[in-house]
Image: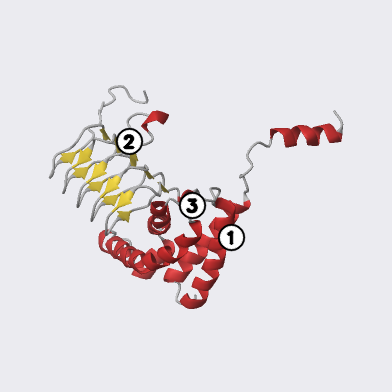
Amino acid sequence: MDHRSIIEKINTHKKQPNLRFRLKRNTEKFTDLLFYTLFDIETPVANSLDELEKQFDELVDLACWESDKPCKKVWENYVEQLPSVLESLNLDAEATVNCDPASLSIEEVYMAYPGFYAISVYRLAHELYKTGFPLVPRLMTEYAHRQTGVDINPGAQIGKSFHIDHGTGVVIGETAIIKNDVKIYQGVTLGGLFVAKNLQKTKRHPTIENNVTIYANATILGGDTVIGANSIIGGNAWITASVPAHSTVFHTPEIKIKTIPHV
């Protein structure tokens, strides 16, 4: 096969006319500047908002494939939400300081905690998700996922004072609902009980009520599953049905004592 034939065959199989990976890179740049604008004391807010608007216009050009959708109007509404997003994120940071005895300062939480970073990007992406802006919110949370190991779908609904400790391996699905003062640890999955494309428009992921703690590697599945308020879910628990308020759920390991040495 000659060089020209190879080029023709590759072009023949490049079937996605809207697949521009520049959108992914630009979204990551946009996400970084958003985060710095909200938190970094040396990043001027006014100048950054002007730059963010320019970057957002570029994202619109790349990602708004349906010309009848008013994507250009999204930015003004989005900027209006940033103060309340920042207020929520400050509560998340305070929750981490109050929950984690290893935290030395709130500055450490903002700069060094992967759970807090993942929550920050999620909250910023969620506001765009609610507008129906295509693809960009998912690229934002996937960027955070790649950096932290925490996978939060931008469609999830998360209340105030949310704390993720350690973070690696956490998965929170699109239709999950997490209410206020919830704490979760590494490896927790809030997932779907069944995987089928025809369930796309249904609630597939669990609801976590106020003041629930979910310890490492617990798996909670199903759109009808509700974890009642003030409950504690122990590590490695597997839950596919609702749990009443004020419950403690734990996994009981099987322990066998060796009777023959070195076996």
Q: Give whichever of discs 1 and 2 has the lower sequence position.
A: 1
> Could one spot residue 44 in this view of the protein?
no
Q: Residue at x 16, y 47 (%)?
A: 229
Q: Earlier in the sequence, mark 2 or mark 3?
A: 3
Q: Is residue 8 left or right of residue 83?
A: right
Disc 1 marks which amino acid? Glu
Circle 3: element type: loop
From the image, which quarter does the N terminus lie in?
top right
Q: Which residue position is annotated with label 1?
A: 58
C-alpha span from label 3 to label 1: 16 Å
Circle 3 residue:
69
Q: Residue 202 — which label?
A: 2
Label located before the other in sequence (3 or 1) = 1
Q: Could you say where residue 213 lies in the image, as x and y percent from the top left?
A: 23, 48
**24, 169: nearer the viewer:** 24
- In percent of the image, x 20 and y 45: which residue is there? 232
Residue 100 visible within the image? yes
Front residue of this view, candidates 179 and 110: 179
x then y, percent, for residue 61: 58, 56
Q: Quadrant of residue 217?
A: top left
